């Protein structure tokens, strides 16, 4: 149970306050200290949701208690009361960190309102701090999830480009084969940009039917088509102030491409079924495993959209182009899998690593992770070259 402390040297007043607050604040334990020194000693041993303190007291005045208490525990909330009230005293108390100042004779309704507001404010601050801490921890987990592993020249080049590109708002087109890590590059750009406090909204253009992609990107209004039972915000609007990642954009229909081009040109979107335009401020990062120049030649991709998207191009090489990163990747996946399963980390014999480096990884990093998990489950400890021969089919 949280506690409220009354600091008052006049027993008649402290008794009345204790009685009233005990009735009003049934979820709190109400304690009394007879002077500032006693209150400070209690504060050294315990925490209080609120301290209601007189100002004129022997041994340690209320203002001195306020200053010393906030040095000891800065989150402590004070409501000050005084029978010798003047504007200067009130201003001094508030400047020193008090939440409120109430003159004697005390207006009980005024006191109760102030106390409740002070406690509500403190609870909101505590909840906000808890959410902030949880959000920070979540961001760390997300950051770790999208960590780029390796020391190859190819990866170093990508990381250098990310450092240069991220601070700008330039659109980026990420190319490379499936499973090579294009999503990691997109997340790295967002996390290192000034938009990292805003959302990063991902859209897999290949996974959304062509007849629904426009609604998914730009939203729709109720009744605009069968199944539109309520208004829906589109991904562009949800990404406002942040980044939208259009993955597999080479699979987007020409009709949807035209709508995206207009959104990029005008920084506005129109929900399906509405003539209303919504202004959006988003950074666009796109990715594809297709050769968009060939797609343009075949009439499958708009050349004007390509030029809008490819202000900066980043190529993510296949794993076969950076096999020197395989030892680090194996160690990273082994640790991640152990963390997920709650097991000790399995080691890999150097000859097993060499054997993995001999393979051609058509599925790239995604395939390597699956193989590492298979070897951890089926192989010995450490995983041997014989395990690789037995459990990896190439």
Image (cartoon, rainbow, N blue to C red):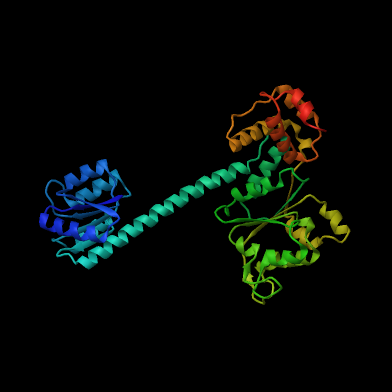
Q: Nearer the viewer, residue 4 or 362?
A: 4
Residue 69 image position (x, y, % from top left): 25, 47
Residue 155, visible in the rendered structure: yes
Examine the rendered structure and indicate whether residue 359 appears above or below residue 15.
above
Residue 134 lies left or right of residue 263; in this view the side is left
Examine the rendered structure and indicate whether residue 227 appears above or below residue 172.
below
Q: Image point 59% across, 51% down: which residue? A: 193
Q: Image point 18% across, 51% down: which residue? A: 32
Q: Quadrant of the C terminus?
A: top right
Residue 315 lies left or right of residue 33; in this view the side is right
Q: Nearer the viewer, residue 377 or 42?
A: 377
Q: Image point 70% across, 33% down: which residue? A: 372
Residue 304 image position (x, y, % from top left): 79, 62
Q: Image point 79% across, 49% down: which residue? A: 289
Examine the rendered structure and indicate whether residue 185 appears above or below residue 253.
above
Rendered image quadrant of residue 299: bottom right
């Amino acid at each position: 149970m949280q506690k409220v402390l009354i600091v008052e040297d006049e027993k008649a007043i402290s008794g009345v306050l204790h009685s009233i607050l005990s009735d009003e604040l049934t979820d709190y334990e109400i304690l009394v200290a007879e002077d500032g020194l006693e209150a400070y000693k209690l504060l050294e041993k315990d925490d209080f949701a609120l301290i209601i303190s007189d100002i004129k007291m022997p041994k340690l005045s209320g203002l001195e208690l306020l200053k010393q208490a906030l040095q000891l525990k800065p989150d402590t909330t004070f409501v000050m009361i005084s029978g010798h009230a003047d504007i200067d005293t009130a201003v001094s108390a508030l400047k020193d960190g008090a939440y409120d100042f109430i003159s004697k004779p005390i207006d009980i309704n005024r006191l109760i309102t102030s106390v409740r507001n002070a406690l509500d404010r403190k609870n909101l601050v505590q909840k906000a701090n808890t959410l902030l801490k949880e959000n920070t921890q979540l961001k760390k987990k997300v950051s770790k999830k999208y960590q780029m592993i390796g020391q190859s020249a190819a990866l170093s080049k990508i990381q250098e480009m990310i450092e240069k590109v991220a601070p700008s708002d330039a659109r980026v087109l990420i190319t490379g084969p499936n499973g090579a890590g294009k999503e990691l590059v997109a997340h790295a750009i967002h996390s290192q940009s000034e938009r990292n406090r805003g959302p990063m909204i991902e859209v897999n253009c290949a996974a959304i039917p062509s007849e629904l992609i426009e609604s998914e990107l730009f939203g729709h209004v109720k009744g605009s088509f069968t199944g539109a039972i309520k208004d829906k915000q589109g991904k562009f609007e949800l990404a406002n102030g942040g980044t939208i990642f259009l993955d597999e954009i080479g699979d987007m229909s020409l009709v949807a491409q035209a709508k995206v081009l207009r959104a990029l040109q005008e920084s506005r979107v129109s929900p399906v079924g509405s003539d209303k335009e919504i202004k959006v401020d988003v950074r666009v990062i796109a990715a594809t495993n297709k050769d968009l120049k060939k797609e343009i030649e075949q009439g499958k991709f708009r050349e004007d959209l390509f030029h809008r998207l490819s202000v900066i191009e980043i190529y993510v090489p296949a794993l076969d182009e950076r096999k020197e990163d395989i030892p680090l990747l194996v160690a990273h996946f082994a640790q991640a899998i152990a963390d997920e399963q709650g097991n000790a980390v399995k080691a890999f014999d150097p000859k097993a690593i060499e054997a993995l480096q001999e393979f051609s990884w058509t599925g790239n990093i995604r395939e390597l992770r699956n193989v590492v998990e298979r070897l951890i489950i089926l192989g010995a400890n450490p995983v041997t070259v014989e395990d690789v021969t037995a459990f990896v089919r190439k």
